[in-house]
Image (cartoon, grey):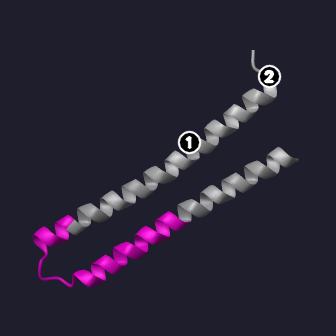
Amino acid sequence: MAKKSEKKFLAEEQTSLSEERTILSYVRTVLAIVGAILVIINVYFKDTNIIFVLTTLTVLCVVVITEEVLRFRKLRHAREKIQNA
């Protein structure tokens, strides 16, 4: 039977991996939405100013990804603080 410390370590690793998967799923979702919007723009709105739309979507994508990475780092830092206490 596994010791309590081993179980705790495995549980923390599982939590860390699930947080990473969540962040990656957010990134994939944002990229899929951007791709879908670009397809819609190319099919239906060929005369609009696409550079403005692409810039706006790119900034939105960078903001979402940055926010998720910062959230993950904050959670990891808090978990390390708890482990070291």
Q: Quadrant of residue 68?
A: bottom right
Q: Position of residue 10 (x, y in %)?
A: 69, 32
Q: Which residue is mark 2?
A: 3
Q: Is residue 81 magenta?
A: no
Q: Quadrant of residue 36?
A: bottom left
- In the rendered picture of this protein, how many numbered marks are placed on residues? 2
On screen, residue 29 versus residue 80, left or right, reads left
Q: CA distance from mark 2 to mark 1?
A: 23 Å
- State whether residue 27 is above or below residue 42: above
Drawn side of residue 32 relative to residue 4, left or right:
left
Which stretch is magenta?
39-66
Most foreground residue, 39 or 17: 17
**Disc number at residue 18?**
1
Question: In the displayed image of the protein, which residue is found farthest to the top?
Answer: 1
Q: Amino acid at mark 2?
A: Lys
Where is residue 28? Give x, y as percent.
39, 55
Residue 67 to residue 72: above or below: below
